[in-house]
Each structure stands twice: as C-alpha cells, then as structure tokens.
Amino acid sequence: MIRTLPKRHLAFAALLVATAIWGVATPIIKLTLSHISLFSFLFFRFLVVCCILLPVTALELKRNPIDKRDLPNLFVLGLLGQASIILIFIGIKYTSSIDAAVIGIMAPLFVIWAGHFFYREKVKSQVKLGIAIATLGTLFVVAEPILTEHGFSLSVWLRLGGNALVILYNLCFAAYIILSKHVMGKESDQVDGALSTFGLKPMRKEYSPLLHTSITFYVALLVIIPLFVLESVGMLGGDTFHTGNWSVFALSGILYMALASSIIAYFSFEWGLKTAKVADSAIFAYLGPLFTLPASFVLLGEIPSKFVLAGVALAAVGVVIAEKGKA
C-alpha cells in the first residue's frame, strides 16, 4: 500500500521547490539584464505569465467572484508581492547576485518578527538572539563594498544602493506573506489595524492561493506597462525597444522567470503557505543561498570575498541558534 504523505510534509516540499527556483533566479536575472533592458525584461515576463494564467483566472473568478470591496487589498498585495520585484531587479543590476542572496537571509527574519506581531506566533529568547546574530552577519555583507574598496567611490555607492534596494524588497515580501495569510482567511486584529491605518478594510471573503496569486500578476503588469513604454521610447535612459536585439540569453531568462520563477514557484509557495505557519516559510528561505552560490559561480563566475564569507558564517551561526530555539 502506498502511504500518502501528510499535508504538512507536502507543504514543506512545495516551499522547498519555490526556494530552489528563486535561489537560482538571482544570477539568472543578473545575466539576463546584460542582454535586455530592465523594464522590457519585466514587461515580457509578466505578459507571458498573464497570458498563460488568463483561462485559469477566468475560471477561478467564475467560481469565486471577487467582492469589489476587496479589490484595494488585492491591489496592495500585488504591489507588495509582484510589482516590488522592480526593486530587486534594479538592486541586482548594481550589486552581486551573491550579495543579494545573503542579504535575502534577512527576509525570513522579517517574516518571523512579522508573524510574531501580526499572528501571535511565539518567538523565544534564543530565537531573538539568533536573529540578532544573523542580522549582524547580513549587515556585514551589506557593508562589504566599503570594506573591499576602502572608500566611497561611485561604484561603492551604486553597490550600496543596490544592497539597500534588495533589503527594501525583502521587507515588501515579508509584508506580502503576512497579507497573503489574511487574504486566504487567517484572522488577525493586528492585520486589520494595519490595513485601517492605510485606509483599507478587512477582507470580506476568503480567496484561494490560485486566484489571489493570479491577480497579483495582473497588478504587476499594469504597474510595469507605463514604465516599459517610457523605457521603450528612451525616456528612462534605456535603449528603444527592438526584439531583434534579443539573444538566446534574453529569451531564456524571460521564460525561466515567467514559467519557473513566477508560475511554478509562486503557486508552490502560496499552496505551501496556506498549510504551513508563517515561520515555517522562513526556515526554507534560509536555504536560498545554497542554490544561489553555485548558480552564481557557474553562470557569472562570481566568487564570494572573504568579507562575504565571514558575513555568511556569522549569519549561519545566527540561523542555527534561532532554529534550535524554535525546536
């Protein structure tokens, strides 16, 4: 007799799939951006996703129509989860994919604190200590451009700015996770209070991971379209749009980010998140650099500096302490 895996284990497997895909995505984004302009990359990524999801989204909307009063919340969800990707795309353009991956360790730390505040998930003192150490290690990586360049040249400022944008994206993604749980029916007075601060109301209905994730992609496409148009006519400093300039790297990057990083990874993540705790998703996010580091070496030839390795080691110690505290 074939044993059926517990739903919790399947949720963990789904989160791991998403983590692996997103871990490899970082160097792929950086490589692709050397062959196609930023907003062209984002526009065609979301256009492909939205075209593929159109019949599925239409069917889901027929089964569970959206309450018009929930549209503002879903729009904000789209801004946090998808449109905010603009931040990391720009950030990766100016920093290394290794830096971006290590800084990404801060995302689960943000998620753990947010889960504690918004959903009353307990955080033990040992976990707090681990988070503090991991944060220190991550900040070491953020400041690495200053340590390696011995000054504040233009390249240093650009790299620091890139690192700052990666941090800002991780904050947005943590907020996306918290709001996603709320959209899927998880009740929280704190989330309701945060929404009211921005003039938003609590959700009227519960929506499936498939539906609300699909909606976020359409929100992102709407945000990207005007930026793509401005870039295409040269108003954002990029080249005017011309598909004839695309290489196989550009096409491959668009397809990977559309099919794997968007559709497969996001739906796997949302399906796993519906069953798992917010803090559970954080555990798997720690594994991201394990996929990014080898991919960065193979695709970009990036090798971490001694300062990055020191920061990674310090962050790893913090993660181990935090996870032992959760046990």
Image (cartoon, rainbow, N blue to C red):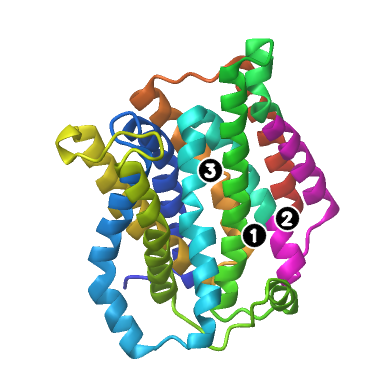
- Which residue extends farthest right? 125
**Disc marking residue 279:** 1
Res 138 quadrant in image: top right
The secondary element bearing badge 3 is classed as loop
Local crowd size for mark 1, using a 10 Å CA cut-off: few (<14), some (14–19), many (≥20): many
- Identify the mark nearer the N-term, 1 or 3: 1
Q: Which residue is mark 3?
A: 287
Res 173 quadrant in image: bottom right
Q: Are marks 2 and 1 in contact (CB under 8 Å)?
A: yes
Compared across the picture, whether 326 is left or right of 269 comes to right
Q: Quadrant of the N terminus?
A: bottom left
Q: Nearer the viewer, mark 2 or mark 3?
A: 3
> What amino acid is found at the position of numbered circle 2 in the picture?
Lys
Between 296 and 284, the one lying in front of the other is 296
Specify the principal SS of the magenta part.
helix
Q: Nearer the viewer, mark 2 or mark 1?
A: 1
- Identify the mark nearer the N-term, 2 or 1: 1
Identify which residue is drawn at 47% across, 72% down. Answer: 7
**Disc marking residue 326:** 2
The secondary element bearing badge 1 is classed as helix
Span colored in magenta: 112-139
Coordinates of residue 309 in the picture (x, y in percent)? 61, 22
Q: CA distance from mark 1 to mark 3?
A: 14 Å
